[in-house]
Amino acid sequence: MLCWKRPRSVIKFVLLAGAFFCGQAWFLLSLNAAQNHSERKGEKKKTESSVFRHPSKGRFWISAQVNVITQGHPPFHAPYSGVNSLKPSGEIATSEVTTLYTGIRASKDTEVIFDLESAGGRGISDALGLAGFTNLDVVRNPELGAQPAVARFFVRQIIPLGDKMVSAERGPLSLATEVPERRLEIVAGKFSLPDFFDVNAAGGDDHLQFMNWTVDNNGAWDYAANTRGYSDGIMVYYASRSWGVRFAEALMPKVANGIYLDADLARSRSENLEFEIHQSLLPGRQGTVRLLSYVNHADMGSYRQAIDAYLVGETPAPDVTAFRRPGRVKYGFGINLEQEIGAGVRIFGRWGWNDGRNESFVYTEVDRTLEFGGDLKGDCWRRPSDKVGLALVSNGISGDHRRYLALGGLGFILGDGALSYEREQIVEAYYTARLTRGVYASLDLQHVQNPGYNRDRGPVFVPAVRLHLEL
């Protein structure tokens, strides 16, 4: 069932969210009392998005960003807890991510991108106990520390397939201001697959939009990455005016949620294919549909084998890690929609499914997901750089996966010691305000029903504040 079986919890969330945002709005507004959004001759004044101005053209790029999220939750109902449970006692945690972006255009059609990143702090319960965890910035292994690491180091080669040029948005991951309308792009090196796949303009940026893992990304896409979210690979992208297709081959980690990648492609790799169709459902409005499929090959364990071994007494508890075999396969599909429906108003949605037979290995423990949401710019209340968003996501797992958890098995994120299964339902709302040039503050509130797919625990409210700097 995709519907919420506790309607009072949803009503309570809506009322609490309204009180939360209304009660705190004065704080954000007072911090930016000097900001003017005057209009002259019907044209709005251009807003700078970063503290320092970056040249609109040139061979070089250097910028940085800082993202700080403080998040917590009050005590909630939980008759029992396990090793990987969300802690039922109240807690608060802060994460910090700092990224240095650099790039150079070696030629008109060749770019080199090199980024350093430091991810410090921690998430509530060390990012355990929720399939749809509430903070995408959190590194799931707090023992890694905040030491800077190479996040991206890749080369992009553009091969023109026609003479017609179209404008392109210059930024830290793409330096060109115009590109051929028909072209082939080849990206090789270290990058994050969500940099290019499953992109969504309204629901894909945890620094200015939503924070939840399964709102910003397709939770059922177990995309190839190390613990920090990056992989080594190659991507090929064909682009035309109305459609495009991209394919990537990337390395999988050696173990689930591992920091080290396996370079033996014969036994471990990930293939990702996405079709992108630029087709609006409404005349005169922008809209995009993306169709994703993926196949992962890795040293994964089988849920069913772990269950069978436990039931005949071979193991004291179900342990999927004891039944890992090289070359096991996980495959899945996804749909990603975004549609502009009016000036400053967008809606979006995602659907995802994977076979759920072998262990969740990289991203999170989700085998089925369905998401709807939207955002609204602040033009109607005279703050065009502000934005408010609302999203609802419903996550589920396969029969083998839920039975494994119910018998006391542990995944790399979930494990309450028992399980009274129900889909994990999440509602998230945020308000992001531009305080001054390059400085943004956000208020966020999430309501999670059946945390970790367990109706015996929760629901839980997770409020958060976020400070984001674009440098």
Image: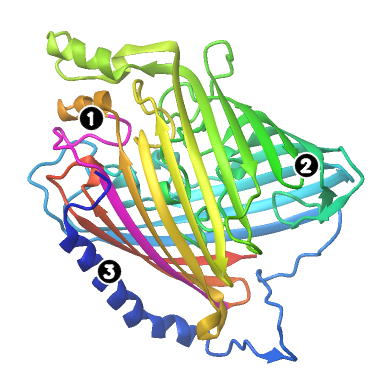
Q: Quadrant of the C terminus?
A: bottom right
Mark pair 1, 3: CA separation: 30 Å
Task: Report if residue 429 lies within the magenta region.
Answer: yes
Which residue is most to the left? 79
Residue 212 in view: no
Compared with residue 41, is residue 348 higher up or lower down, i.e. above or below?
Answer: above
Comparing labels 2 and 3, the label whose residue is closer to the camera: 3
Q: Secondary structure at mark 1?
A: helix
> To which residue does mark 3 refer?
14
Question: Residue 301: horizontal and vertical position, in percent?
Answer: 35, 17
Question: Residue 20: horizontal and vertical position, in percent?
Answer: 30, 75
Q: What amino acid type should be assigned to the residue bearing mark 2?
A: Val
The reply, left or right, for residue 23 in relation to residue 458 is right
Residue shown at the point (46%, 51%) measured from the top left? 349
Circles 1 and 3 in contact, beta carbons < 8 Å: no
Mark pair 2, 3: CA separation: 46 Å
Front residue of 409 and 12: 12
**In the drawing, what numbered circle is on residue 93?**
none
Q: What amino acid type should be assigned to the residue bearing mark 3?
A: Val
Q: Secondary structure at mark 2?
A: strand
Residue shown at the point (46%, 62%) measured from the top left? 374
Q: Secondary structure at mark 3?
A: helix
**In the drawing, what numbered circle is on residue 112?**
2
The reply, left or right, for residue 180 in relation to residue 403 is right
Q: Which residues are magenta?
A: 411-435
Q: How is the image coloured?
A: rainbow
Residue 54 in view: yes
Residue shown at the point (82%, 54%) measured from the top left? 166
> To which residue does mark 1 refer?
402
Mark 3 or mark 2, which is nearer the start of the sequence? 3
Question: Residue 254: horizontal and vertical position, in percent?
Answer: 47, 21
Compared with residue 319, is residue 218 higher up or lower down, i.e. above or below?
Answer: below
